[in-house]
Amino acid sequence: MNVTRRQTFMLGAGAVAFATLGTQATTALASPESDKLIADFAGGKTPASGRIKLKAPEIAENGNTVPVSFTVESPMSADDNVVSVMILALGNPAPKVGEFNFTPMSGKAAASIRIRMAKTQDLVAVAKMSDGSVFIDKKTVKVTIGGCGG
Amino acid sequence: MKHAKPRVKVPKKAAKGDVITIKTLISHKMESGRRKDKKTGELIPRKIINHFKAEFNGTEVFSANLEPSVSANPYIQFSVKVDESGTFKFTWTDDDGSMYGTEKKIAVK
């Protein structure tokens, strides 16, 4: 794989984020693009840790299909439920993976999908509650073979 | 695309108030728009399923916006709380606007 200028930059940004990881456990993220995505999704709130749990393999041999699932603690009643959950793969060319919209009829705020991962990177799941609060969870996945082509 | 074939697993029966798990899969390449044609070296245009929606008796219960980072043959598993018998309707929307759908019935006692 040829390393382009952009990738070199991304690697640098990743290294910086990694260096600051220890001090800012919940908010140290890899790129300004994903920071902005999370800020837009959170609508001005600061994401707190807890309530949402992201599940992904520690090592993904095939980056083309990585099984990922999440659950959010919530009674899922008419006035207290999870509105939506966003998943980001911070090291992918486009970090956003998808957004999942729940209703009180969901019963349980949980879903599983399979995603592509270009390289070893952090996965982030952000949950938005009906009262406006926002929760975040993060997980590092090692990828043996990247799954984004090119 | 003719090959987009949806497959959905919904329990046939459930008790009132149960939270059931629904598994869906649709065969689709999910062309990310970043792959190059090996012969011409040109980018293959993006073509993915960008939206999924599940309705129960006409009310939306779950939906998802998907991006190119979702794997080929997108698999989505989610939950629904059922209080009455009825029909689930699942709809996938492609980038070119075409929709693929399927329906499943459930009996609730």
Image (cartoon, coloured by chain):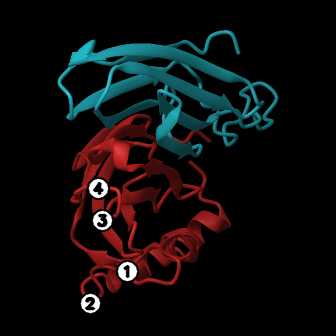
Chain colours: A red, B cyan
Q: Are marks 2 and 1 in contact (CB under 8 Å)?
A: yes
Q: Where B73 falls versus A15 (above or below)?
A: above
Helix, strand or loop at label 2? It is loop
Q: Residues within 10 Å of mark 1 (few under 14, many from 20)?
A: some
Relative image position of residue A80 (x, y in whole percent):
31, 64
Helix, strand or loop at label 1? It is loop
Same chain for mark 3 and mark 1? The answer is: yes
Residue located 77% across and 24% down the image: B39
User: In which image quadrant can residue B49 be found?
Assistant: top right
Same chain for mark 3 and mark 2? The answer is: yes
- N-terminal of the pair, mark 3 or mark 1, is 1
Front residue (pair B22, B85): B85
Residue located 58% across and 46% down the image: B67
Same chain for mark 2 and mark 1? The answer is: yes
Residue located 65% across and 31% down the image: B93
Tell me, for residue A28, which label it has, or none: 1
- N-terminal of the pair, mark 1 or mark 4, is 1
- N-terminal of the pair, mark 2 or mark 1, is 2
Q: Residues within 10 Å of mark 4 (few under 14, many from 20)?
A: some
Left or right of A25, for residue B30: right
Q: Are marks 1 and 4 in contact (CB under 8 Å)?
A: no
Mark nearest the camera among 3 and 2 is: 3
- N-terminal of the pair, mark 3 or mark 4, is 4
Residue located 77% across and 35% down the image: B45
Amino acid under disc 1:
Ala
Relative image position of residue A11 (x, y in whole percent):
49, 70
- N-terminal of the pair, mark 2 or mark 4, is 2
